[in-house]
C-alpha cells in the first residue's frame, strides 16, 4: 500500500520562510508517494477567514493553496482538520485546495488498524482560560459576526490575539499546556481504545497509556521549525516518525 502521512502545527507565515520551503519540498516530493495526507490543525499561524484567498495582495496563502491543490491533482487525498489558530478555515479553502475538512475528533479505520485523530487542544482541559475562549470562538453565531468584520480588522485582531497568547503562555504552568491525563483516558475509552494521533502541545513523543487494562499508544506530532519539520508515516504495519528538512 501507499503510505498515509500525518503532519500538524506548521504555523505557516511569510515570516517563517524556512517552514514554507520545507512544506513546499514535502508537497512536491515525499508526500507524492502517499495515498493520503492528513493535516491535523494549525497549518497556518492564523487564518482570518477564507476571503483572504480573494485578496490579490495575499500571495502567500495563494501559493500554499496552489501547492496543496497540485498534490491533490497528483492523486493524493488531502484531509485538513482545524487547529486553534486556523479554525476559520472553511469550504472556500476546501474547494480551492481540494482538501476534505475533517471533524475533530475523527476516527480513521484502516484495514489493519484503528486511529483516532484530534488537533489536541480539547484535551488540555486544565487550561480553563483557553477552554472558555475556545468555546466562545467555536460558536457558529460568534464566527458569523467575526467574519462580518473587514478582513484587515480581523487580521489585526488575530495578530493581537497571537501576542496575547504568547505572553499568557509565559505565565502558565507547564501542565496547563499539556493534555489532562484523565481527559485523555476518557477520550481513548470513548473512541474504542484506538491509537491516538494529535499535535498542538509541541511536545513530540510517543506515550503508552493503559486504559481499562488495554494498552493504547498516543503519538504527539512535532511542531515545525525553520530548519526541521516532521511527518508520521503509516505503512500498513507501523507508525514511524520522519524528519523533514
Ligand atoms: O496558539 P498557541 O500555541 O500560542 O496557544 C494556544 C492558546 N492560544 C490560542 C490563541 C491563538 O494563538 C491565536 C489565534 C489566532 C486565530 C486567528 C483567527 C481569528 C480569530 C480571532 C478570535 C478573536 O488559541 C493558548 C493555550 C495554548 O494553546 C496551550 O494549549 O494556552 O490559550 C491562550 O493563550 C488563551 C488565553 O489564555 C485567553 C485569551 C482570551 C482572549 C479573549 C479575547 C476575545 C477577543 C474577541 C475579539 C472579537
Ligand atoms: Mn494548536
Image (spheres, helix red, strand yellow):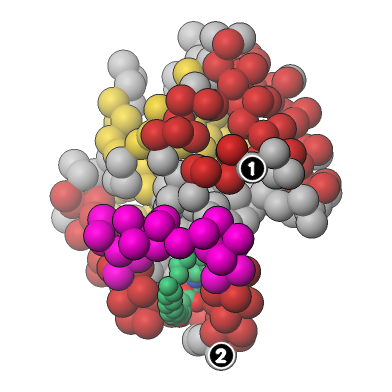
Q: Position of residue 173 (x, y in %)?
A: 50, 86
**Residue denoted by label 2:** 171
Q: Where is residue 50 in the image (x, y as percent from the top left)?
A: 50, 43
Answer whether residue 152 is magenta in the image.
Answer: yes
Asked if residue 176 is positioned above or below residue 3 in the image, the reply reads below
Q: Residue at x 65, y 25 (%)?
A: 66
| Residue 106 located left or right of residue 198 | left
Question: Can you see residue 111?
Answer: yes
Question: Can you see residue 238?
Answer: no
The kind of secondary structure element at disc 1 is loop
Over which residues does the magenta segment extend? 136-157
**Residue denoted by label 1:** 55
Q: Nearer the viewer, residue 28 or 30?
A: 28
When asked about the image quadrant of residue 53, the answer is: top right
Asked if residue 21 is positioned above or below residue 74 in the image, the reply reads below
Q: Residue furthest bottom?
A: 171
Amino acid at each position: 500500500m501507499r503510505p498515509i502521512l500525518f503532519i500538524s502545527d506548521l504555523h505557516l507565515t511569510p515570516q517563517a520562510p524556512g517552514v514554507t520551503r520545507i512544506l513546499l519540498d514535502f508537497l512536491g516530493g515525499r508526500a507524492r508517494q502517499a495515498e493520503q495526507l492528513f493535516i491535523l490543525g494549525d497549518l497556518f499561524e492564523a487564518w482570518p477567514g477564507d476571503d483572504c484567498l480573494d485578496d490579490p495582495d495575499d500571495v502567500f496563502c495563494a501559493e500554499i493553496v496552489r501547492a496543496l491543490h497540485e498534490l491533490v491533482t497528483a492523486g493524493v487525498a488531502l484531509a485538513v482538520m482545524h487547529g486553534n489558530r486556523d479554525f476559520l478555515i472553511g469550504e472556500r479553502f476546501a474547494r480551492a485546495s481540494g482538501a476534505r475538512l475533517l471533524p475533530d475528533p475523527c476516527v480513521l479505520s484502516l484495514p489493519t488498524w484503528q486511529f483516532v485523530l484530534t488537533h489536541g487542544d480539547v484535551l488540555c482541559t486544565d487550561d480553563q482560560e483557553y477552554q472558555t475562549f475556545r468555546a466562545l470562538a467555536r460558536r457558529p453565531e460568534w464566527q458569523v459576526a467575526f467574519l462580518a468584520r473587514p478582513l484587515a480588522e480581523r487580521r489585526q485582531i488575530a495578530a493581537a490575539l497571537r501576542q496575547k497568547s504568547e505572553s499568557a503562555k509565559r505565565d502558565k504552568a507547564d501542565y496547563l499546556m499539556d493534555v489532562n491525563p484523565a481527559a485523555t483516558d476518557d477520550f481513548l475509552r470513548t473512541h474504542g481504545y484506538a491509537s491516538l494521533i494529535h499535535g498542538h502541545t509541541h511536545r513530540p513523543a510517543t506515550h503508552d497509556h493503559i486504559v481499562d487494562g488495554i494498552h493504547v499508544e498516543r503519538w504527539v506530532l512535532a511542531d515545525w521549525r525553520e530548519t526541521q519539520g516532521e511527518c508520521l508515516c503509516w505503512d500498513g504495519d507501523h507508525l514511524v516518525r520522519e524528519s523533514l528538512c
